[in-house]
Image: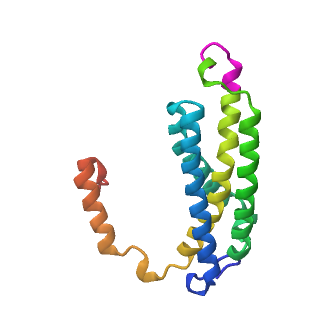
């Protein structure tokens, strides 16, 4: 097993508690931002919270796959760092959002509001990036620990091909 890869059965129970706490905190932040933006910036901006979370989690997956330093870091060390970064970035993003003079009602005639909106969006993405780093590292550790019986087998691939054909028609089948 390579450095940084952990067997899922050898993980201490604390790691599972840490992942649960980080996931719960991320969902709680998402719910709080949904309510906050619905009241402060009208309900249209409340729907941005879903895209904020998706952007943060997607960026964290990209960061995990591209950074050799993060890949080599053991999970019991990366998870508390991701949790601490989540807490710090949530506080910083709250301060930035309160500091920015973004007004969604004047975005149509004041072009600088677009810049404020982009900064608003980037600031609120930070906590989801940090939370996604911890949760994504756990997914990576679980995927590395998968036994051969959990990997797709030949009948499973055949079933997937049939399902693809049923959903997409003949275009999904490779030419032979």
> Which residues, given as a range, are shown in magenta?
107-115
Residue at the far front: name it: 39
Residue depicted at 29% across the width and 54% down the height? 173
Looking at the picture, tell me which residue is in the foreground, 10 or 168.
10
Report the number of discs: 0
Q: Is residue 97 above or below residue 164?
A: above
Percent from the top left, x then y, of residue 39? 56, 35
Residue 65 shows up from this direction? no
- Snapshot quadrant of residue 125: top right
Looking at the picture, tell me which residue is in the foreground, 109 or 58.
109
- Snapshot quadrant of residue 61: bottom right
Looking at the picture, tell me which residue is in the foreground, 154 or 146.
146
Percent from the top left, x then y, of residue 166? 22, 54
Q: Is residue 112 magenta?
A: yes
Looking at the picture, tell me which residue is in the foreground, 139 or 91.
91
* Quadrant assignment for the C terminus: bottom left
- Snapshot quadrant of residue 21: bottom right
Residue at the far top: name it: 109
């Amino acid at each position: 097993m390579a450095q940084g890869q952990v067997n899922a059965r050898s993980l201490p129970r604390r790691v599972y508690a840490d992942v649960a706490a980080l996931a719960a905190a991320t969902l709680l932040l998402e719910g709080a931002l949904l309510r906050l933006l619905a009241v402060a910036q009208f309900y249209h901006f409340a729907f941005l919270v879903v895209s904020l979370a998706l952007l943060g989690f997607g960026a964290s997956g990209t960061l995990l796959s591209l950074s050799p330093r993060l890949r080599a870091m053991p999970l019991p060390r990366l998870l508390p760092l991701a949790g601490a970064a989540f807490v710090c970035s949530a506080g910083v993003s709250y301060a930035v959002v309160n500091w920015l003079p973004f007004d969604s009602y004047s975005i149509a005639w004041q072009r600088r509001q677009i810049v404020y909106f982009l900064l608003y969006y980037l600031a609120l993405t930070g906590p989801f990036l940090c939370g996604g780093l911890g949760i994504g590292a756990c997914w990576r550790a679980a995927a590395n620990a998968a036994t051969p019986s959990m990997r797709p087998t030949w009948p499973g691939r055949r079933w997937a091909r049939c399902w693809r054909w049923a959903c997409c028609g003949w275009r999904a089948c490779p030419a032979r």
